[in-house]
Amino acid sequence: MELVCLGLNHRSAPVEVRERFAVPPSKLGERAMELAKLSGIEESVVLSTCNRTEFYLAAPSADDAIRSLHEKIETGGAEFWYEKRRIDAARHLCQVASGLDSMVLGETEIFGQVKEAYRCAHGAGATSGTLNRLFQRAFGVGKKIRTETKIQEGATSVAGTAVELAEKIFGKLKGCRVIVIGAGEMSRQTAQALVSRGASSVFVTNRSFERAEQLAEEMGGRAVSFDEWQGVLAGVDVVISSTSAPHPVVMPFHIEAVRRVRKFRPLFLIDIAVPRDIDPAVAEIEEVYLYDIDTLEQLASEARGRRERQIEECRRIIDDELVKLNLPGT
């Protein structure tokens, strides 16, 4: 029996491609069973999150399985899809479950998403010996990596660093409210990273209301017209700003106007625009924490060297555990 993983993620495909192949949580088991019934495929698990869609298959022939899968889902756009076989497919799953393949390195949400994908496929009868053993081993690897390494410490991206700083300010981000000013890629990544760690309410504002609506829909949030964003400021905890404005968009008087209504709660402002969107004087307000793109990038850069050593340790753990698995066809 051979293992196959065919997928696309946040690195290989833009959101407009990823959303075409997204599978609703309620359909994961049904879709896995559909694939398991295809010619040349015996077992299947479908993993679908906002950052990836992946199909894990067990089959007598990897070539036949991939051919059947392509015919079924009409993948198209070959440049967006990655294909992994045998031990590489098993290793990839372990990396995904461990948070090594996530936008925010070491994030914990993906572990639960992988478990849910497997639970749905198993419940639908789409898995058997090969994928059952593989996924159980991947869960063990994910747990071991999170307990024996420091992979979650020291974010190495601007988005991850912003999340890490937010967690230091607010503790757990569950229920945290965010407003995104500007709908660019960096705004999307940072907001998505916050949502992945528990942020619940996301407001998006942009001079183009259509773009604000698109990003808000992706985040499961709400679009706000650009001349109304100040009204939302009183109720949020985090402000992410990345517009193309030639001058500051957020001024001290905007914050001062809502401080009393906010009951002087902490406010975290992330300015990832160049030129800067947020007047530096805002940082002088007592309960305000302001970070710009240079500061975030410097913090991320300092963490990269430390993180590289942790990644190597995680990979060693994965390879050691896969040897124990002794998968057929690998």
Image (spheres, helix red, strand yellow):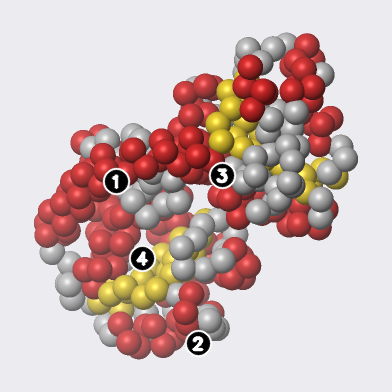
Q: Position of residue 14 (x, y in %)?
A: 56, 66
The residue singled out by tag 2 in the image is 71
Image quarter of residue 6:
bottom left
Q: Cα distance, mark 1 to mark 3?
A: 24 Å
- Which mark is first along the chain, 2 or 1? 2
Foreground residue among 116 and 292: 292
In-image side of 118 versus 169 (left or right): left
- Which mark is first along the chain, 2 or 3? 2
- Which mark is first along the chain, 1 or 4? 4
Q: Tell us which disc is closer to us: 3 or 2.
A: 3
The residue singled out by tag 3 in the image is 190
The answer to whether marks 3 and 2 mark residues whose Cβ atoms lie closer than 8 Å is: no
Foreground residue among 9 and 206: 206
Point 65% across, 54% down: residue? 184
Point 62% across, 22% down: residue? 283
- Which mark is first along the chain, 4 or 3? 4
The residue singled out by tag 1 in the image is 142
The residue singled out by tag 4 in the image is 127
Foreground residue among 178 and 33: 178
Residue 184 drawn above or below residue 226? below
Q: Cα distance, mark 2 to mark 4?
A: 21 Å
Q: SS of the residue at dot 4? A: loop
In-image side of 150 versus 231 (left or right): left
